[in-house]
Image (spheres, grey):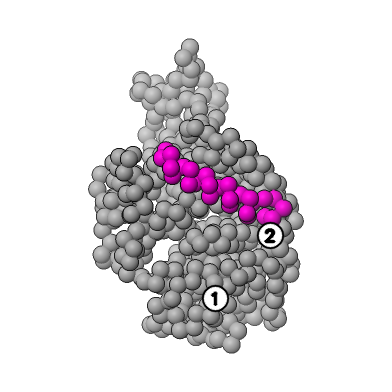
Amino acid sequence: MRISPVLIVIPFFVSVFLVGCRVDAVDEPDPLSAVEFFDTATVQRIDLEIAPEDRRAMLDALPERIYVPATFIWRDIRLENVGVRFKGNSSSQPDGWWKRSLLVKFGEYVDGQRFLGLRRVSLDNAVQFGSVFSEQLMADILLAEDVITSRANYAQVTINGEIEGLFVNVERIDKSFLETAFGNRDGVLYKNHLGGPGSDLSVLQSQEEYGLSFEPKTHEDEADYGSLMELATLLRDTPDSEFEEALAARFDLEPFLKLMVVMMLSGAFDQYTGFNPHNFYLYDNPATGRIHYLVWDLDVGFADNAFGQIPVIDAWNASWPAPRIPRPLLERILSDKDLRARYRAHAERILETYFSPDILQSKLDGLYEQAEPILATDPYPAKRITVPTDAGYPSIVDSMKDFMARRYDTARTQLDNPATERPSHPYEQGPSPGESVPDDPSDLEVVKVDEQGIHLRWKDNSDREELTIVQRCQGVGCTGFENRVGIKPEAPPEFVETLIQPGVTYRFRVYAAWGSANGPVGSGASNIVEAMP
């Protein structure tokens, strides 16, 4: 079935987003058309033509994501022999029921082929996290604050004339993005997708170790991770009296202070500035000599007590936003009196300008009004796994509005009564592993990974524990273990971890805990195991 384009205009910072992160592009033959492609006032119409045997090959190859040839059509532009593949961890699961994200690469089969100067088009499925709203809400605010960020809008996608559904059209961070945003692509662009050693910007034993967590996306042959080690060493070793000047000379500071505010007020917990140090790029810009932090994957937000366990509001203080440590960049900024004051000044202004409930909820209503006609034809059900009780898009919108109101109220109180040091949070309190003792739990193993989750089992060597604590961390080689759950002595020594994301590496260990006159005491930790669903 062929469908007509859907054009809906909403008053949502239109003048800002027609400009986006405008800088004279290096290779952009028609900048205005690219701006139109990311125009937030219009739902884009993208038609893909893929041979049936190639679509079947894409599915048969999963979890490997392979390119197949396709035709890309937008307005009067028709490009043959572009590459199309599935994109993202959730879209790589062979048995996934959901709509799969897509990545279009224009030069995959025709060297140098571009679409409006773009090398790629990224179409996010907007299924799992309610990102059909979150991504654009955050991106629009960041762009309005002149923070270099991917532009985003909606796209209605058909494949071979059949409706595939509503996607979020997110500007891909690649060489074309660098040309548009910075006017050059001469520096190394590093991507941190899954976390791992050094993701928190701590100092590692060697600069090569950062390669376990950071992938160079440009100038791969020249990337030696030296700039990452340099930044981490600056954060660790610079005296307080010199820190502000030294950081501003090497790091694009003011946009990052604004980003800290927007991420906190949006509840974007799956970020360096939140609870998990990943989903970001670092661009070492030779034109300025500064490293620029570029946020990515803003599909998670506006959900409190996410997954039933992440206290997004209660553990994220607006006056001292460091919900997880170690985070050397956040900690050094907030420990500096002048930088903390600059952050709080941005927080005051951004809170009232964009996050007052009447303003933000109205923008959410506008996005829903714009997306609703396409969502009505979307063949995939609405899901928001961060809040499983949300059922359908009206419920998601109401839940997000509840978050917006509570986040505003708590942030307003916290900024009116600012913390004088980093607040401690209840989730950080409790037992922790201690010295090794003869009855430490041992022989931890991953029994299997299936649709239920990651199945763990261990040997219980103690008869005095009150709980056996399962700890986990996220990312290849991660070491920041946190208490996940307590298993009572009468229960079998096993646990199934269900709060997981496909394609993410998780590491686990267990230890025994018991009470004492001085508070809870922990045994030594078991061996470490890891698994990736």
Residue at (29, 50) in percent of width and height:
229
Which residue is rendered at x = 50% and y = 79% of the image?
Answer: 31
Q: On the picture, is 320 further left or further right than 284?
A: right
Kindly indicate whether the residue at mark 1 contacts the one at mark 2 (C-beta within 8 angstroms). no
In the rendered structure, which disc, 2 or 1, sits on the residue that comes first in sequence? 1
Q: Amino acid at mark 2?
A: Lys
Percent position (x, y) of residue 531? Answer: 44, 46
Compared with 134, 412 (above or below) is above
Circle 1 — which element? Answer: helix
CA separation, marks 2 and 1?
A: 21 Å
**Quadrant in which the N terminus is drawn:** bottom right
Q: Nearer the viewer, residue 154 or 164?
A: 154
Q: Which is nearer the eye, 446 or 379?
A: 379
Q: Quadrant of residue 373?
A: bottom right
Q: Nearer the viewer, residue 318 or 344?
A: 344
State the SS at label 2. Answer: helix
Where is residue 429? Give x, y as percent: 50, 27
Q: 10 Å neighbourhood of mark 2: few (<14), some, or many (≥20)? A: some
**Three-letter code, disc 1:** Val
Residue 440: in magenta span: no
Q: Which residue is mark 2?
A: 363
Residue beneath disc 1: 35
Q: Residue at x 50, y 53 (%)?
A: 259
Position in image of residue 173 (x %, y %): 45, 66
Q: Which residues are magenta?
A: 335-360
Q: Is residue 53 above or below residue 429?
A: below
Is residue 101 among what the camera can see?
A: no
Most common SS among magenta residues:
helix
Location of residue 325 (image quadrant): top left
